[in-house]
Amino acid sequence: MRTPGRDADLAIGFLLGEGVIDDARRVASAEEFDGDPQKLVPDTVRITLHDPTKARIEGRLTRTHEIRPSCGLCGLVDADQLLDEFEPLLPGVPKLPRNAVDDRRKAFVQTQPLFAATGACHGAVLFGPDGVTWSSGEDVGRHNALDKAIGSAARAGRPLAHATAMLSGRAGFDLVLKCLRVRIPVILAVSAPSALAFDLCRTAGATLIGFVREGRARVYCDSGRLQDE
């Protein structure tokens, strides 16, 4: 289940966030095919890789068979592989002034027209180190929203190792893991992180900030990126 639209971003972001591919440039093509609801034919995205032998599928997918908007523990293959072959984050990059967190929140709200109209979807935004919005995604599923944002930024060649991600809900371990796999080092969330998300960020050296609301936020992990002004 997903909110239709930007399906190529969704598919490529999913492959990156699950660690199946490590670079969007491995994708040779992404073809989108409209389905037929009357005949129960689903919409389809066909991803072709330049070198399929370099894709890592066995044991990688935390949600097997299909993308679902539910918790990432559903269909979990092996919890011990969560940070398997994890590429380290850049230490102290990017620097983020503490007072800039609220600026990111304000910018985040402006990228969520579907939520403004319905109040019934999730969102994710990726910002550059200067606060410029690199990409955004909205979807009924919070995983899908982040996949769309990651896929869009990666396809545009954005250096995700310098990005800040903001999530519309809680920072669950599954969303945090997607960010860490593509080397996003700063994660902001409107709600709280889970205990496992906190452990992953602390181990990886990521910056994790929860309860990002108007004029306030709670820092769970810093790792030297936050700066006072």
Image (cartoon, rainbow, N blue to C red):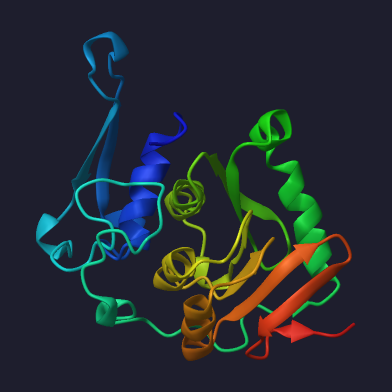
Q: How many marks?
A: 0
Q: Nearer the viewer, residue 58 or 40?
A: 40
Q: Nearer the viewer, residue 158 or 63?
A: 63
Q: Which of the 4 image quadrants contains residue 222?
A: bottom right
Picture coordinates of residue 72, whole percent (x, y): 37, 61
Report the quarter where the C terminus lies.
bottom right
Q: Which residue lies most toward the top here?
A: 38
Picture coordinates of residue 29, whole percent (x, y): 26, 40
Determine the residue positioned at 75% across, 77% down. 218
Determine the residue positioned at 76% across, 60% down. 104
Up-down relation of residue 4 to residue 58 (above or below) = above
Up-down relation of residue 164 to residue 40 (above or below) = below
Determine the residue positioned at 65% across, 64% down. 189
Q: Nearer the viewer, residue 77 or 85?
A: 77
In the picture, measured across the screen, residue 164 lies left or right of residue 180, that is right
Q: Which of the 4 image quadrants contains residue 88?
A: bottom left
Picture coordinates of residue 69, whole percent (x, y): 41, 47
In the picture, measured across the screen, residue 132 lies left or right of residue 72, that is right
Determine the residue positioned at 47% across, 79% down. 196
Q: Which residue lies most toward the left here?
A: 53
Picture coordinates of residue 12, whole percent (x, y): 34, 49
Q: Nearer the viewer, residue 116 or 76?
A: 76
Report the quarter where the N terminus lies.
top left
